[in-house]
Image (tube, rainbow, N blue to C red):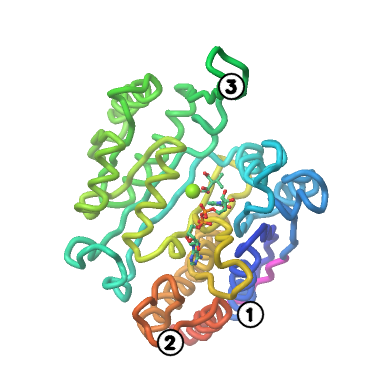
Amino acid sequence: MSYYKIAILPGDGIGPEVIKEAVLILEEVAKHFHHTFEMKYGLIGGVAVDKTGTPLPTETVELCKNSDAILLGAVGGPKWDQELSHRRPEAGLLGIRKTLNLYANLRPVTLFDALLHTSPLKSENVIGTDVLIVRELTGGIYFGTPRERKNGENGQEAIDTLRYSEKEIERILRQGFQIAQGRKKKLTSVDKANVLESSRLWREVADRLSYDYPDVKLEHMLVDNVAMQLIRNPRQFDVIVTENMFGDILSDEASMLTGSLGMLPSASLSDTGPGLYEPIHGSAPDIAGKDKANPLATILSVAMLLRHSLRLENEADSIENAVKKTLEAGYRTGDIGFDWERVLTTTQMGTMVRSYLKSPVQNG
Ligand SMILES: NC(=O)c1ccc[n+]([C@@H]2O[C@H](COP(=O)([O-])OP(=O)(O)OC[C@H]3O[C@@H](n4cnc5c(N)ncnc54)[C@H](O)[C@@H]3O)[C@@H](O)[C@H]2O)c1
Ligand SMILES: CC(C)[C@H](C(=O)O)[C@@H](O)C(=O)O
Ligand SMILES: [Mg+2]
């Protein structure tokens, strides 16, 4: 029996809906495997702006720092579109990533066999898709300064800055190499080195580091080509490592290989301190409040949390297995079930996954 502290940050839109199902899964795991998960809730995003005036209250940061892991839903929505940039919900998410130094964002793109025909691509092209996108999460154009508006000769000018230090590049690339060592030993480093100076530095560092990982085959690929290759032949990839914005865009694209954006979990990790786990999708304002969202990305994020932060491998496996069984039994939410006669609500999908969760005794 073990005791763990988990911070729960539901956020906005469908965030609270998918988090509710994920928390019920955690409670089920606690029961079956005899753990205690102390779950404390915190505010982040638009809901935090409304209640405290800031998207990342100090109490939330303290809660996260004092937890073993963090589970987050999603932030943002049209209600806050007119907010000043430091009061935008997204600033809360970027703030917690930066504050906790969560520079390594793992986004596994794994197609469940049961969803083979849900992917918009031809089955023979996507079958067996298993790619891990390693996205740099605390640098690049998201955080570079100067970042400002000013008056120029042709009206207002807006400036964003894409800046990377060698140290930032090296630490994320090392993550990529090490993760590849535990998989099929192929690392695709994605950049735009034909245009960007930051990408040229990125490529130099990757080449230098590759001598430390002789068992890993390193290849460089330009980001526009990767966007195309992911659709043409995703199985050529094992681990993809890339900078912040390329990783954001490529992971939404890659999610469709698995059938839906609602299927992709993520882990955001630092070298020390708690990891943060969240679906890669957003607050989905178009379906919020309708009990329609697919909770599987968040439920699979719980599995990542158990595996990476709490080192509970069997418990993580049991969740992934329950999701697999649920899909094999033909249960679908609307995003992965457009041809299905009966589509489940968010709540029903969560209930179904819980029913397939087995205790270690039952597994044995
Ligand atoms: N990590 C995050 O919190 C995060 C991520 C992305 C976007 N956002 C924010 O979310 C808001 C909406 O952004 P957007 O509409 O561009 O992206 P989105 O990811 O919220 O939604 C894109 C589309 O995918 C669908 N979708 C997303 N998740 C789904 C799920 N679990 N099940 C079924 N369908 C799902 C939505 O209905 C929508 O049609 C914005 O404020 C954005 O900044 C937050
Ligand atoms: C909401 C936004 C800031 C965020 C990002 O761009 O990192 C989201 O798109 C994501 O992928 O987690
Ligand atoms: Mg994104």
**In this image, 52 relative to 232: left or right?**
right
**Secondary structure found at label 3:** strand
Measure the C-alpha gap from mark 3 to mark 2: 52 Å
Q: Residue at x 70, y 60 (%)?
A: 5
**In this image, 139 relative to 132: left or right?**
right
Residues in magenta, as a range: 33-38
Q: What amino acid is found at the position of numbered circle 3 in the picture?
A: Gln
Q: Residue at x 20, y 53 (%)?
A: 233
Residue 208 vs 179, above or below: the answer is above
Residue 129 located within the stretch drawn in magenta: no
Of circles 1 and 3, the one toward us is 3
Of circles 2 and 1, the one toward us is 2
In primary-sequence order, the first of circles 3 and 2 is 3
Q: What amino acid is found at the position of numbered circle 1 in the picture?
A: Lys
> Where's the N terminus, which quadrant?
bottom right
Q: Residue at x 67, y 62 (%)?
A: 4
Q: Where residue 355 appears, x then y in whole percent?
A: 52, 86
Ligand 1 lies under 8 Å from the Cβ of mark 2: no
Q: Quadrant of residue 170?
A: top left
Question: In the depicted view, which residue is nearer to us: 357 or 91?
Answer: 91
**Secondary structure found at label 1:** helix
Disc number at residue 31?
Answer: 1
